[in-house]
Image (cartoon, rainbow, N blue to C red):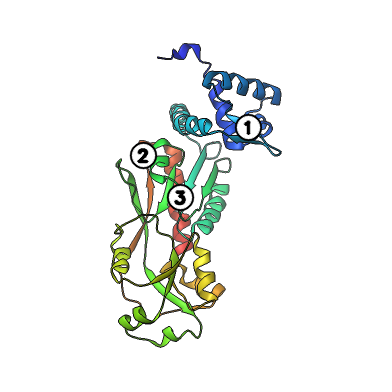
């Protein structure tokens, strides 16, 4: 077993900064160190982990698979240490320099991110929040457990560990088509299912969907002709073709105004799709994280009305 007394733990924040910044010079600036000092630390880390860790490119560095594995393990641990120190000192949002990473796979994610930044600029001006708004987040459950993602606004409940959550709002599923599409005159759901093909987001899960409203759509056996990776592609394809889009009701105004789509009369009431704010329970007592959650809820409700 490795003796931690033989390891200089001061090297780990250097590794973290180099990994996140993808640049040794930006890591040096972030840590208020000289670039030679950061390069020396990275060389020592290479010896410790017996791996190159970072491969130089024309612009910055590219982490190796070993660096990806190390970052996944230490990011949460370093965050926990920072949280513990911050809690002993007390939390002041006006002076805090905490960093957070938030995942918002919902199509309104980018707008929620903008509103959250605007709010934090007034309530906690030095708190830095980075975002992922990917429609298909990579291994979100694991990232929440390990701390590389601090919170998520999502419609899929994480599996495995018990997570803390709160309802942000209830969404719903809506079928929409381009103006003038023949399906807009149909009032019978069976006629709609027989006569059209759909465009939708590529599902994040295989098999029967855990969200009842989405499971109900699956059971209709509607023909999905095209699956895409990002929601804006759903709207774009529907606006330029005879494919019918599956749209969250919260996006209806955007679909109307920007893509001239119209709701299909025969869209059934598939029930609510709960959109939840989710985080790991070890963050429950973290005052800075509590502020993040509060501001996320307010920003989300500002966007969704």
Q: Identify the mark at residue 45; answer none if there is no mark.
A: none
Q: Residue 186 in the image: x percent, y percent?
A: 37, 86
Disc 1 designates what residue?
A: 55
Q: Is residue 51 above or below residue 180?
A: above
Disc 3 designates what residue?
A: 137
Disc 2 designates what residue?
A: 284
Give the CA separation, mark 1 to mark 2.
38 Å
Residue 305 appears anywhere in the view:
no
Mark 1 against mark 3, which lies toward the viewer? Answer: 1
Q: Is residue 178 left or right of residue 187?
A: right
- Asked whether 57 or 300 is in front, the reply is 57
Q: Residues within 10 Å of mark 2 (few under 14, many from 20)?
A: few
Q: Quadrant of the C terminus?
A: bottom left
- Asked whether 4 or 138 is in front, the reply is 138
Q: Residues within 10 Å of mark 3 (few under 14, many from 20)?
A: some
Q: Is residue 235 above or below residue 167?
A: below
User: Helix, strand or loop at disc 3?
Assistant: loop
State which tag comes first along the sequence, 1 or 2: 1
Q: Quadrant of residue 61?
A: top right
Query: Which residue is at a point 29% across and 42% down the rendered structure image?
Result: 162
Q: Quadrant of the N terminus?
A: top left
Give the CA separation, mark 3 to mark 2.
23 Å
Q: How many marks?
A: 3
Q: Kindly check if marks 1 and 3 are in contact, taking CB atoms under 8 A apart as contact.
A: no
Mark 1 against mark 2, which lies toward the viewer? Answer: 1
Q: Residue 24 in the image: x percent, y percent?
A: 66, 31
Q: Residue 253 in the image: x percent, y percent?
A: 49, 72
Q: Is residue 92 above or below residue 40?
A: below
Q: Is residue 128 above or below residue 24?
A: below
State which tag comes first along the sequence, 3 or 2: 3
Residue 300 appears anywhere in the view:
yes
State which tag comes first along the sequence, 1 or 3: 1
């Amino acid at each position: 077993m490795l003796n931690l007394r033989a390891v200089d733990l001061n090297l780990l924040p250097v590794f973290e900064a180099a990994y996140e910044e993808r640049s040794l010079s930006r890591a040096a600036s972030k840590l208020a160190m000289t670039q030679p000092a950061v390069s020396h630390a990275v060389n020592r880390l290479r010896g410790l982990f017996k791996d190159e860790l970072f491969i130089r490119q024309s612009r910055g560095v590219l982490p190796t698979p070993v660096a990806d594995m190390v970052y996944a393990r230490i990011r949460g641990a370093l965050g926990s240490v920072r949280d513990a120190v911050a809690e002993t000192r007390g939390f002041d949002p006006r002076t805090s320099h905490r960093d957070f990473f938030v995942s918002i796979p919902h199509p309104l994610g980018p707008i929620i991110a903008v509103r959250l930044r605007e709010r934090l600029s007034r309530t906690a001006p030095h708190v830095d929040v980075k975002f992922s708004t990917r429609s298909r987040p990579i291994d979100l459950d694991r990232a929440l457990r390990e701390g590389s993602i601090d919170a998520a606004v999502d419609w899929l409940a994480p599996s495995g560990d018990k997570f803390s959550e709160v309802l942000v709002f209830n969404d719903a599923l809506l079928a929409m088509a381009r103006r003038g599409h023949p399906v807009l005159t149909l009032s019978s759901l069976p006629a709609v299912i027989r006569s059209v093909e759909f465009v939708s987001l590529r599902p994040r899960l295989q098999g029967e969907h855990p969200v009842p409203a989405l499971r109900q759509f699956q059971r209709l056996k509607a023909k999905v002709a095209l699956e895409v990776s990002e929601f804006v592609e759903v709207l774009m394809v529907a606006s330029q073709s005879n494919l019918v889009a599956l749209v969250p009701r919260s996006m209806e105004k955007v679909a109307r105004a920007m893509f001239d789509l119209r709701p299909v009369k025969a869209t059934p009431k598939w029930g609510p799709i709960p959109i939840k704010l989710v985080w790991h329970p070890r963050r429950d007592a973290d005052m800075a994280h509590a502020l993040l959650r509060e501001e996320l809820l307010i920003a989300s409700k500002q966007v969704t009305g």
